[in-house]
Image (spheres, rainbow, N blue to C red):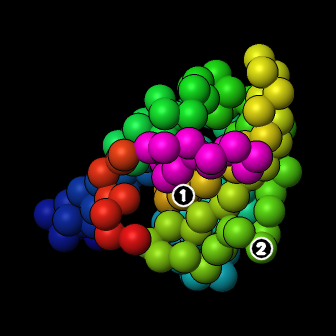
Amino acid sequence: MNLKKAMPYLFLAVLLVATITIRRCKGMAPLTDDTNKPRRQQPSTADRDRGFDRRVSYINYSAHAKCRMKCRKITQEEVKDIMQNGNINYNKSDVNDRPCPTYALEGYTQKDNQHVRIVFAQCDNNTKVVTCIDLEQDFECHCPGDDKK
């Protein structure tokens, strides 16, 4: 076979080997498996399709929640403790809520044994504290959004 005719095939072979090598060096998985079906993307660091994720590294607070926490003297540490150890009240939760499922967790704070319900909304890698409720004592709070009730 003539070298001039083989040159394009050699170039394509070298290009293919280089592509495979680069993908492996970067830790990228091939796009297809043996059956030529697209592979499912690896789950993100927080797989929210499996229920409530209790990891506190993804938590943030809505303005409403911050106001309620201040009014009801609930600290961020107490919210995190309820997130990790509280009981999910499925009657007050909405796992089909959009854009993010909401979970109402209940428990007692360690510092002052306050009976609370904390509502969390979980989307992707983000957990947002929606509101904080004291289940035994009424507080006079004036928070954003209260006039919409």
- The image quadrant that residue 63 belongs to is top left
Q: Amino acid at mark 1?
A: Ala
- Residue 4 seen: yes
The residue drawn where x is 73% and y is 50% is 135
The residue drawn where x is 80% and y is 62% is 89
Tell whether 37 sits left or right of 7. Answer: right
Residue 38 in the image, given as x and y percentages of width and height? 54, 76
Residue 53 in the image, given as x and y percentages of width and height? 69, 49
Marks 2,1: beta carbons within 8 A: no
Depth check, mark 2 against mark 1: the one in front is: 2
**Mark 1 Cα shell of 10 Å, populated few (<14), some (14-19), many (≥20):** many
Quadrant location of the N terminus?
bottom left
Quadrant location of the C terminus?
bottom left
The residue drawn where x is 78% and y is 21% is 112
Q: Which residues are magenta?
A: 128-141
User: Mark 2 = which residue?
Assistant: 91
Tell whether 73 sits left or right of 66. Answer: right
Judge whether 128 appears above or below 59 on screen.
below
User: Mark 1 = which residue?
Assistant: 121
Q: Amino acid at mark 2?
A: Asn
The residue drawn where x is 30% and y is 51% is 144
